[in-house]
Amino acid sequence: AQSVTQLGSHVSVSEGALVLLRCNYSSSVPPYLFWYVQYPNQGLQLLLKYTSAATLVKGINGFEAEFKKSETSFHLTKPSAHMSDAAEYFCAVSYTGTYKYIFGTGTRLKVLA
Amino acid sequence: EPEVTQTPSHQVTQMGQEVILRCVPISNHLYFYWYRQILGQKVEFLVSFYNNEISEKSEIFDDQFSVERPDGSNFTLKIRSTKLEDSAMYFCASTDSRAYNEQFFGPGTRLTVL
C-alpha cells in the first residue's frame, strides 16, 4: 500500500540553525509530493510541491525540498530557522488516477531562542 | 486571493445527533475533498467529489456520512448519527486540476461530540 513516513514527530532546532524535516514515500509509481504547514488552530497551507519538473523545489518562507527517486525521499529544508517557523509540517503524496492526498503523521517543529 | 471557507469553525453536538459541515470551495474549482484530523493524529482522506458524484471514498466514509453540493457554491458533509469517535477537525479542500492536484484547504471545522 502507498504510504508516507515522516521520521521524527518532534524536531527542535535553535534559531538560525538548519531545519531538516524528513519525508519518505513508498510507491513504485511516480508521485506528486507536497509539504504543508499547519500553525496552531489554523488550516493547512501549501509550502511547496513536486510535480515531476525540477527535482529541487523552492517554496514559500525560504523552504525548499529535493525529490530523490533513488531514496524515495522528499525532505524539507531551510538554511536558517526563524521563530515564526514553529508549526506542524505535513508531507503528502498523491498519484495519477486517485488524486487523494495521503498524509504523513506530521512533524512538530520547535524553534529555540 | 481566493480561499476555501468553512462554517462553523467549531461545532459541539450530542452523540446521535446529525451534523452538517459546510464548505465554500474556490469558485472555479471542480474537485472537492473532505479530510479529517483526529486530535494528535494525521490528516486522513474521507471522500472526493467531482461532477456531482463521489469519485473515491475511504473506509472511514461509511453509511453515516454523505456529501452534497446543493448549489453552485456550497459543498457539505453530513454525519447522520454522530459518535464520540467522530470528534475531529474536518478539512474541506478543492482543486481545479487533477493534473497537479494542488489542493487548497479551508481552515477546518472542529467537531466535538459529547
Image: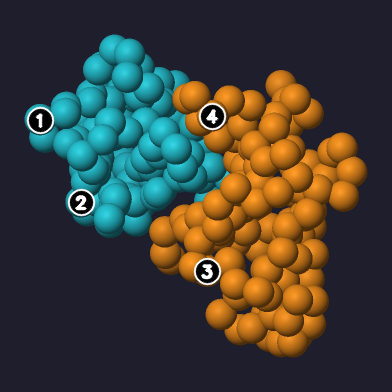
Chain colours: A cyan, B orange
Q: Nearer the viewer, residue B43 or A43?
A: B43
Please, is residue A39 above or below residue B22 in the view?
above
What separation in Å lies between label 4 and label 1 (alpha carbons)? 26 Å
User: Which residue carries the number 3 mark?
Assistant: B60
Q: Residues within 10 Å of mark 1 (few under 14, many from 20)?
A: few
Q: Which mark is residue A7?
A: 2
User: Which residue carries the number 4 mark?
Assistant: B98
For the N terminus of chain B, give its image quadrant. Answer: top right
Point out residue B109 in the picture as x, y percentages from the top left corner: 68, 58
Instruction: Report the amino acid beneath label 1.
Output: Ser
Q: Are marks 1 and 3 in contact (CB under 8 Å)?
A: no
Horizontal side, residue B82 vs residue B60: left or right:
right
Look at the numbered disc 1 and give the secondary structure of its residue: helix
What separation in Å lies between label 2 and label 4 (alpha carbons)? 29 Å
Identified at 60% across, 48% down, the residue is B55
Q: Residues within 10 Å of mark 2 (few under 14, many from 20)?
A: some
Instruction: Report the amino acid beneath label 4.
Output: Arg
Identified at 61% across, 32% down, the residue is B95
Point out residue B68 in the picture as x, y percentages from the top left corner: 78, 54
Specify whether residue A30 is in view: yes
Point out residue A49 in the picture as x, y percentages from the top left corner: 40, 26
User: Looking at this rendering, what residue extends furthest in the left direction?
Assistant: A70
Name the quadrant containing residue A63: top left
**Nearest-to-viewer mark from 4 and 1:** 4
Return the chain for callout 1. A
User: Which residue carries the number 1 mark?
Assistant: A70
Identified at 84% across, 39% down, the residue is B73
Please, is residue B8 above or below residue B15 in the view?
above
Q: Residues within 10 Å of mark 4 (few under 14, many from 20)?
A: some
